[in-house]
Amino acid sequence: MYTTYFGLRERPFSITPDPRFLYPSPQHQEALGHLRYGIGENSGFALLTGEVGTGKTMVIRSLIDQLPDGVNVALITNPNLSAPELVAAICDELKILYPPTTESLKTLIDLLNHYLQEQHQLGQRTVVIIDEAQNLSRESLEQIRLLTNLETHQEKLLRIILVGQPELRKLLQRHDLRQLSQRITARYHLNLLSADQTRAYVGHRLAIAGLGRNVFTVAAIRRVYRLTHGIPRLINALCDRALLGAYSEELLTVTPAVVNRAGLELFHGGTNSWSRNLVIAAASAIAIVALLAIVWLTWPDTLISPAADSGQVSRSGAD
């Protein structure tokens, strides 16, 4: 693939949330700072929101990598669960054993509380991170709030980070969820990258992948920004496709034209589909022309033969 062609150790624009590739923009650093504060000793909740593809999961993965020893993490990536299922999922992440057939929320919470008390005595902290939290039900959100009631006289036994799309902020503004909202001690919203940040983002990921120069021209980067509006996930997809396009055309730099073709293929049904349709149309046209040619070549014979027969009959009648 294009990695060897450009001298890269690995693909720089994979969409998997590898913390090594986290672009240290001011807002991403600030987001990490808010989350670290939000899971401090006297905190209960932290909130991270952002549009789809802005790097929330990447920030979370980076936070987990940076947590010191002595912090236990339960990461919930599918929160579309009932309240008992959610608590059971937290127990699973923390490797807390419970009767496999139990449906008792009290049993699960008692076991979780016992675990938290033990970990506290050992000097350990426990953090629950819930991604895609905008999908949590009202019942599950209330249960999460109640979990933060597990505490000693000095501190909370459980810290919780809610991560989600902007809808989560609107959800927490509901009157019936005000108790949970009031317990959030740190909030941060990730915005889209600016044009300058997009250029730095692309260069950063190329450098992490082993390339010391930016193979995208300045004009190409401007085009990337216009097509993606500074959304990191879209930047990754577009730049990956553009590098593949430059490789297939044996170019050493990625130009705006290459980015345009990659964008057409990625966002508008694909250049390949357009080309395929053009080939099909051309083949159909050729077939039609060939058919007309055959008909034209055989048509005179069809006309002459009856005429000749008619002439013979006429002469025979005269004789």
Image: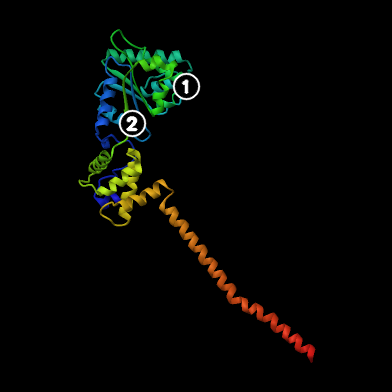
Q: Residue furthest left?
A: 212
Task: Name above or below for residue 254 compared with residue 188.
Answer: below
* Amino acid under disc 1: Ser
Q: Residues within 10 Å of mark 2 (few under 14, many from 20)?
A: many
Name the residue: 63% across, 79% down.
301
Q: How is the image coloured?
A: rainbow
Q: Which of 22 and 308 lies nearest the eye of the viewer? A: 308
> In terms of sequence position, does the residue under pointer 1 or pointer 2 come before the other?
2
The quadrant holding residue 118 is top left
Q: Which of 303 and 210 lies nearest the eye of the viewer? A: 303
Spatial CA span between label 1 and label 2: 24 Å
| Mark number displayed over residue 56 | 2
Q: Which of 114 and 294 lies nearest the eye of the viewer? A: 294
Location of residue 217 in the rendering, given as x and y in whole percent from the top left corner:
25, 49
Determine if residue 83 is in view: no
Q: Residue furthest top?
A: 153
* Disc 1 versus disc 2: nearer the observer: 2
Residue bearing mark 1: 82
Q: Residues within 10 Å of mark 1 (few under 14, many from 20)?
A: some
The quadrant holding residue 97 is top left
Name the residue: 57% across, 70% down.
292
Location of residue 82 in the rendering, given as x and y in whole percent from the top left corner:
47, 22
* Amino acid under disc 2: Lys
Q: Residue furthest bottom?
A: 319
Q: Which of 9 and 229 lies nearest the eye of the viewer? A: 229
For the C terminus, which image quadrant?
Answer: bottom right
